Image (tube, rainbow, N blue to C red):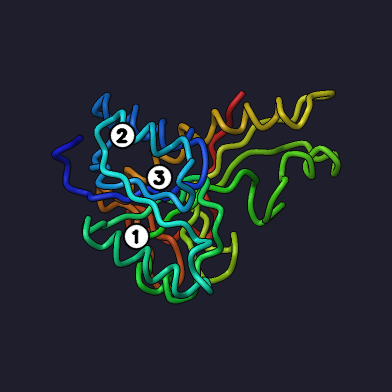
Amino acid sequence: MSSKSCNTAILISGSGTNLQSFIDHVASDKLEISLAIVFANRANAYGLTRARDAGIATACIEHGDFDDRLSFDRAVAKMLDKAVPRLLLLAGYMRILSPWFVNHYAGRILNIHPALLPAFPGLDTHRRVLDADVTWHGSTVHFVTDELDAGPRILQGRLAVEPGESADELATRVQSIEHQIYPQAANWFANGRLVYRDGAAWLDGKRLDEPIVMDFN
């Protein structure tokens, strides 16, 4: 799909809305990445259709066919490595990665989480945010480490929570943010501006002790 140099694998489990944002950005020549392969752990993941329609190679291994997480992750890595990815993007990939997998791709896996980490790790973030009556919500791009949702934060997009909005409405607004900040962070990595070093994220040679924050309406 692209002749650009940063071979990238995107891992999904579902509909692939963030995947579609990457497809659109690459098609409009806004990203310095090549979408080498899209992998899903569910054969019915609609994101696989999105990828095929865009001419991107796809692969699927059902996690239920394996006895444990490690054996599944080893099989996934064996398949992904054929595409020689320099960057892995988790985009709605509903699997907890084994330490072996994280180490195999150390410093090369990015994830996006629908909350302003370290607040609200885990699932059902939009409902939890509303229940907690907080003022700000958003999404965080971070490097993946062994600890769930705890890797070095890179970029956050945030917005003010509106009085009376539902969890679904809030989720839609946050998802729109994700479609902007995730490609941005991936491009930083592709351009060599973003690296993982000494357990931290570094951008343009400066350690990010706090993520860059962008405000949205």
Q: Residue 185, labelled with which disc? A: 3
- Quadrant including the C terminus: top right
Q: Secondary structure at mark 1?
A: strand
Name the residue: 38% across, 51% down. Answer: 60
The amino acid on which the numbered mark 2 sits, given as a three-letter code, is Arg
The amino acid on which the numbered mark 3 sits, given as a three-letter code, is Ala
Q: Earlier in the sequence, mark 2 or mark 3?
A: 2
Disc 2 to disc 3, C-alpha distance: 24 Å
Tag 1 near tag 3, CB within 8 Å: no
Name the residue: 38% across, 71% down. Answer: 74
Q: Which residue is mark 2?
A: 52
Q: Secondary structure at mark 3?
A: helix
Name the residue: 56% across, 47% down. Answer: 140
Residue 64: x and y in percent read: 53, 61
- Quadrant including the N terminus: top left
Q: Which residue is mark 1?
A: 195
**Nearer to the camera, 79 or 83:** 79
Residue 25: x and y in percent read: 33, 29
Disc 1 to disc 3, C-alpha distance: 11 Å
**Nearer to the camera, 197 or 54:** 54
Image quarter for residue 177?
Answer: top right
Image quarter for residue 200?
Answer: bottom left
Q: Earlier in the sequence, mark 1 or mark 3?
A: 3
> Of circles 1 and 2, which is in front?
2
Residue 110: x and y in percent read: 43, 54
Name the residue: 54% across, 59% down. Answer: 95
